[in-house]
């Protein structure tokens, strides 16, 4: 049995707390919101973010960060990406040398263009920072539906520790050394999911969705590989797998926000309606900045930015993508005959 703290009591943090409790670990959940902790203590259910998932009496809840972090072998950092740096900064004084921090949020910091694990390493240099992601909606993990994810770390030993910590008969965990590829896949797919939602909101069909998913993973892969990630990672669970589930699922907040925008809502109106952090909105600008930095063409992501931040109608953005200059699908394939 391991002592584990979940830092962040959103839907994903709560779902992972149920996995860890099922595996017999000693689990503490922290939130900065006192009212949220009071509700969890009283009801043992997150009635707002994960209704219907009842939490064991064995799980403890606290708003005391020192209490949460101290004496734990693993810290699962599950706050939204926009709060990763500020939360890591608060945690830093309580984290001991070699303590494992598993980042499970997805995003790229807009100002610095840093992935989340790099942010945590910068703020908490004494920690052993890892990541875990893949096609895994909290609503399904909380209901114990079969799910597969990937644990990434700099050392195989740490990745395998995380694998052993979480893995059970309904939650399968693979390992990978390519943390960069995992995090880029997990972050950039949210931007493509906004586009997929816009297509749904416009009333387009399966052909359109398939095109966005396929060309979307092509864009993600181009950028990730240019930054040093491995193409195999983008072909796996944290690339195409995560992209498929986020573009298709009714649970996807990014798809839902995009759908509302496709129906005529503004970005601000859509965000209010979703009532949760829409990570793709925060990653969209960062993705475009990275594309310019690494001189990579990302036409879908560029059009999403125009819709989000320049009030371009979603239908016009789709038309722009369709009438772009004609090209081959894969530049590295050669013709045998002229």
Image: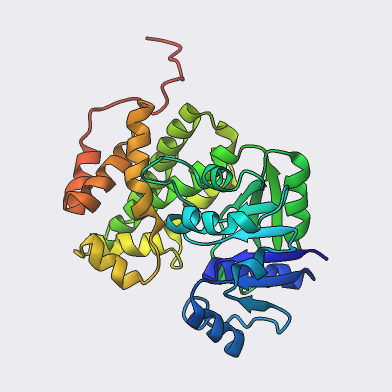
Residue 270 appears in the figure = yes
Looking at the rendering, in which quadrant would you find the N terminus? Answer: bottom right
- Residue 312: give x, y in percent of width and height: 16, 50
Looking at the rendering, in which quadrant would you find the C terminus? Answer: top left
**Is residue 76 placed above or below 310 in the rendered structure?**
below
Taking the image as shown, residue 95 lies to the left or right of residue 206, namely right
User: Which residue in the rendered view is the most extreme toward the front?
Assistant: 93
Q: Nearer the viewer, residue 126 or 263?
A: 126
Q: Nearer the viewer, residue 52 or 315?
A: 52
Q: Quadrant of residue 77?
A: bottom right
Residue at left offset 54%, top offset 32%: 229
- Residue 159: give x, y in percent of width and height: 72, 46
Q: Quadrant of residue 216?
A: top left
Residue at left offset 35%, top offset 70%: 274
**Is residue 313 placed above or below 65 in the rendered structure?**
above
Taking the image as shown, residue 68 lies to the left or right of residue 294, namely right
User: Which residue in the rendered view is the most extreme toward the top?
Assistant: 338
Residue 296 appears in the figure = no
- Residue 104: give x, y in percent of width and height: 57, 56
Residue at left offset 69%, top offset 78%: 59
- Residue 18: give x, y in percent of width and height: 67, 72
Residue at left offset 73%, top offset 53%: 162
């Amino acid at each position: 049995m391991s002592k584990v703290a979940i830092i962040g009591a959103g839907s994903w943090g709560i779902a992972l707390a149920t996995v860890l409790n099922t595996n017999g670990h000693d689990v503490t959940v922290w939130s900065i919101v006192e009212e949220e902790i009071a509700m969890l203590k009283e009801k043992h259910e997150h009635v707002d973010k994960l209704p219907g998932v009842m939490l064991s009496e064995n799980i403890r809840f606290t708003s005391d960060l020192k209490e949460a972090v101290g004496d734990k072998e693993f810290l699962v950092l599950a706050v939204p990406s926009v709060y990763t740096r500020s939360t890591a900064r608060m945690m830093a004084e309580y984290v001991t040398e070699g303590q494992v921090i598993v980042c499970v949020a997805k995003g790229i910091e807009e100002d610095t263009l840093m992935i989340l694990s790099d942010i945590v390493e910068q703020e908490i240099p004494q920690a052993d920072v890892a990541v875990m992601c893949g096609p895994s909606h909290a609503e399904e993990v909380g209901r114990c539906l079969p799910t597969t994810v990937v644990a990434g770390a700099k050392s195989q030993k740490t990745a395998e520790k995380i694998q052993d910590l979480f893995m059970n008969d309904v939650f399968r965990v693979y390992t990978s050394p390519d943390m960069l590829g995992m995090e880029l896949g997990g972050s950039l797919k949210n931007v493509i999911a906004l586009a997929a939602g816009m297509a749904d909101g416009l009333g387009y069909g399966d052909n359109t969705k398939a095109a966005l998913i396929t060309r979307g993973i092509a864009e993600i892969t181009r950028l990730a590989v240019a930054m040093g990630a491995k193409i195999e990672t983008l072909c796996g669970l944290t690339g195409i797998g995560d992209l498929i589930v986020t573009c298709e699922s009714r649970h996807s907040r990014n798809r839902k926000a995009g759908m509302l925008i496709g129906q005529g809502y503004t970005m601000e109106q859509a965000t209010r309606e979703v009532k949760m952090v829409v990570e793709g909105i925060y990653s969209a600008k960062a993705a475009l900045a990275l594309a310019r930095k690494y001189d990579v063409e990302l036409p879908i992501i560029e059009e999403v930015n125009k819709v989000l931040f320049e009030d371009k109608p979603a239908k016009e953005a789709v038309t722009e993508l369709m009438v772009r200059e004609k090209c081959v699908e894969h530049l590295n394939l050669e013709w045998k005959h002229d």
